Every structure is written in C-alpha cells, then in structure tokens.
Image (cartoon, helix red, strand yellow):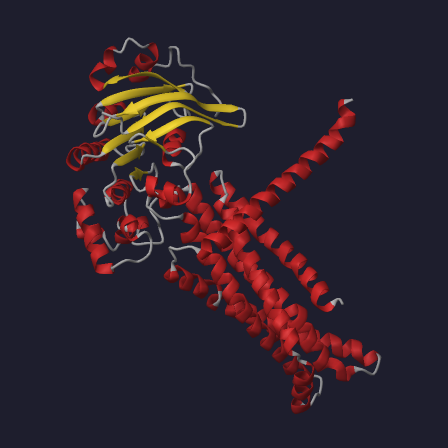
Amino acid sequence: MTAKISLAGVAKRFGSKVVLDGVDLDVAPGESMVIIGGSGTGKSVLIKCILGLIAPDAGSIRIDGQDVVGLHGSALATSRARFGMLFQGGALFDSLPVWRNVSFALSQGGGGHAAEMRAAAIDNLARVGLDAGVADLRPSELSGGMQKRVALARAIAARPEIIFFDEPTTGLDPIMADVINNLIVELVRDLKITALTITHDMGSVRKVAHRVAMLYAGKIVWSGPVADIDNSGNAYVDQFVHGRADGPIKMAMRRP
Amino acid sequence: MNALLAFPIAVGAFVIAGLRATGRLTLFAGQALWRALLPPYYPARLLEQMLLIGWFSLPVVGLTALFTGSALAQQIYIGGSRFNAASTVPAVTVIGIVRELGPVLGGLMVAGRVSSAMAAELGTMRVTEQIDALATLRTDPFRYLIVPRVLAAVIVLPFLVLVSNALGVMGGWLIATQRLGFNSANYLTTTAKYLEADDVVSSMVKAAVFGFIIALMGCYHGFHSSGGAAGVGRATTNAVVSAFILILLSNLIITVIVFGS
C-alpha cells in the first residue's frame, strides 16, 4: 500500500539557519500521525512545506505517490484541495460571520448559494458540538475554545483527505483540550481522514496518535507506535516525554 | 583595509537591497495584473472595495479640494494684483486644480486613508495566519484579497478626482465671488473657457495611476509583513510613505510627458 504522505530528505534553511535537515516520514492512509518536538524545531515549517506554502530546498514530498514539490497554478490548487488545516490561533476570518467561515472552502470565498452554505455550515458546526446559534456570531464574539471548534468545523467542511492540526490544544484549559482531542479522534475515525498533528502536549499525543515521530535538530530521531512511547529506548524521546530539563536536548536560551 | 571597504560594502548592500525590493514589487504587481484576468472573480469583493475606497473617501477628498481651491484663488489674486493681472484668477485656478492639485492632493489623501488601512488589514491577516488559511480553503489569496483592491482603486480614483476637481474650482469660485469681488457669471465663463478636455483626461489618467499605486503599496506591504504587531505597524508606515513618494514621482513623470513638450 502506498503511503498517503511520504517525505524523503526534506530540507529547508532560512539564511544560515538550518530548520529541516533531511526529514524522512511516511504516513499511511487513515493513520493519525503525531509529530512531537520542542518549540522552534521546525514542526510548523514541515507542515507548510507539505501544504506548498513554503518551498523546501531539497527532498521530495509525495501525496498518494505524486510529488507535490514545485507545483504551481492549478496543479497546486488541485493538490491543496485534498488538505484541511487547523491553525494554531484558529485563523478565522474576523470580517465574516461564523457560518461564512465554516462554508468558506465550499463556496471558495465567492458567496455560493447562501441558504445551502448556511445549512452546510450548521451541519459541520454540529459535528464539533456547536449549535446553530453560533452561526451568525462573529469570531471575535467566541471564546478561545469555541474559536478552535469553529476552525475545526471549517477545516473539515470540504471533507479533505488529509488534515493537519497545528498545536490543537495550545492555550486551552485541560477540559477544552480534551474535548478537542476527542473531536480529532472522532473525525479521523468517522470521516476516514489521514491526520498529521504537531504538538508538544503529551496528553494530546496519547489520545490522538496511532504513531508518533519525534523531530529534533531538523531530523526525525525516532518514530513508532504510540504504545512504545514510554519505552522507546531513545534518550531524546525519553527526555521529551517526561519533560526533563536534563538530557541530550539542550534548551537554547535564545530564540533561534 | 576593512575600514576602507566598509563604505563601498554598505553602499553595495544598500543598492542590492533596493534592487531586490524593486524586483519583488514588480513581480507582485505583475501577479496582481495577471491574476486579475483569470477566474475565479470576486465581484462582491470588488464592489465592497469600491465602496470603501471611493464612497467613504468622498468627504476627505472633497474638503481637501474645497479648501485648497479657495486658498489657491486667494494667492493667485494677491500675486496677480502686483502685475495688474488679478483677472487671471479663474483661468489659473482651474488649470492648477485640474492639472495638478486635484489629482495629487486627492491621491495623497486617499493614500493616507486607504493604503494604511489595507496594509494594516492584510498585515494582521498575515500574522494571524489568515492568509495561509485562505490557501488551505481552496481560495487564492491573491485573487481574493489583492485583485479586488487594486481593481477597485484603479476604477474609482478617476471619479474621485473628478469630484475633487469640481470642488476645487468651486472653492476658488466661492472665495473669488464672496471676498475678491468677482462677478459670478464672468468667473464661470472664464473658467469654462480655460478648462480643456485634454486636461480633464490627463487628470483622470493620473488618478488611475495613483489608484494603482495606492492599492499596490497597501497590499504589498501588508501581504509581506512579518513580526507581530510591530511588523504590522511598520508595514502600515511603509505603505503610506512609499505610496506618497511614488504618487509624487509618477505625477512628475506624467506631467513632463504630457505637458512638457
């Protein structure tokens, strides 16, 4: 079976700063892969490379066996249509009401049939546990947890084959974080979506991951089933999972 | 040795940075024009921007023209009196307003209002990842955000400048008839005699160019902003300052080409 997402030797540097230094990773269809790693290790850059928002300097990125590096124009648009993404801050369009946000991918920003779009938005809001009452609110009128849920509804509205979750639980209280984790598990299971999550929240990892990969110094230093995470035999993973200051990972005190 | 080289190195770095920025801006402008031609189109966004740029700029552009036209007529009267040429007030006012002050001041006022607003809005969208989000929602950020703004500004600026010209001439007429003792009918007849169709056309061409500059600067700086709130502030300042300079420079170039020969 071909991997849904297959990265080989993906490298990216900004100026003299090497962010990704040959990343190899395969994600099977329907699998929930979680990439862990400290802040500033290039997790977000990796996702943006796969989405085509950032061009990698080297390496190949295959989706369903097709190389997507260097695509542009309509080929890039077609490739991107397979993806959905939940951004860390939600990235909701604050000039539009919630229902326009949620139906955005369906109407491609251009109006569409308003009643249909509204109904589709309400369907997707229900999937993330929000009732029709929020449809007409503005994003700024929602709490952080609700914004995250609306953003989740927006990301799944067009039923993408692959969905990226960028720090889905960051900034939420533990209960709301668990609600979001449960939603991710349900969506992956029910909609048969391939999921790639980046996080440093171990609670989230244990809940949503089928497999885990650890990114450190621009490379994947370990990957394996989530069950193995506590006895990975890898000093980097051990230090990260247990959140210890001492170990092979030295914290840079300056932002890279 | 190092001290000797420091100056040429600094000059070289400055020149390279300038060329690089010019290149990026040219590519950005080319993209905006090219993608304006290809679907999907966003007519609702275009109308919204025309309303924001055109309609809501009317008060500020109108007042600017009215005050400037009045002041201009007053000064021409004072200056003209020294040569027994006070009667040139209507002719010089209409030429000055339509050829230069109407479009330039109108353009500058709209740049202050619109370039800044565009840079701040797009800059905030950039730093909150809303522009990246558009790309993941099957929507081209260029066509959705930039093309409607640029098109709208190019379309509405000529009409704004027509209003600006009319109110500028009216400002001159007001002060001439109310304070300087001109006969209203004579003033208007002389104005009409010296108002040429070519001047109006060049005025509108200037306005369209200024509209392009205003939207392009606002969008370019906003779209490429980075570094949080401070970055958005920088983008806004850069958008307004560069729009001002490019408006004045392009005005000079058009004036020399159209009227210089």
The answer to whether one can see residue A136 in this image is: yes
Judge from the rendering whether residue A194 lies leftward or rightward of residue A49; answer left or right.
left
For the point 29% across and 39% down, which residue is it? A82
Judge from the rendering whether residue A122 lies leftward or rightward of residue B208; answer left or right.
left
Q: Position of residue B173 (x, y in %)?
A: 65, 82
Q: Position of residue B197 (x, y in %)?
A: 63, 78
For the point 18% across and 34% down, which residue is it? A192
Q: Is residue B54 above or below residue A214?
A: below
Locate the C terminus of chain B by quadrant: bottom right
Q: Position of residue A201 (x, y in %)?
A: 29, 25
The answer to whether one can see residue A90 in this image is: no
Identify the residue at the far right of this view.
Answer: B83
- The image quadrant that residue B74 belongs to is bottom right
Q: Position of residue B39 (x, y in %)?
A: 39, 55
Q: Is residue A227 above or below residue B131?
A: above
For the point 63% across and 70% down, which residue is it? B202
Judge from the rendering whether residue B261 lies leftward or rightward of residue B164; answer left or right.
right
Q: Is residue B64 above or below residue A167?
A: below
Q: Nearer the viewer, residue B100 or A137?
A: B100
Q: Is residue B128 above or below residue A45?
A: below
How many numbered discs sit on the rendered protein? 0
Identify the residue at the far top of this view.
Answer: A233
For the point 27% across and 35% down, which residue is it? A162
- The image quadrant that residue B181 belongs to is bottom right
Locate the N terminus of chain B by quadrant: top right
Identify the residue at the far left of this view.
Answer: A190
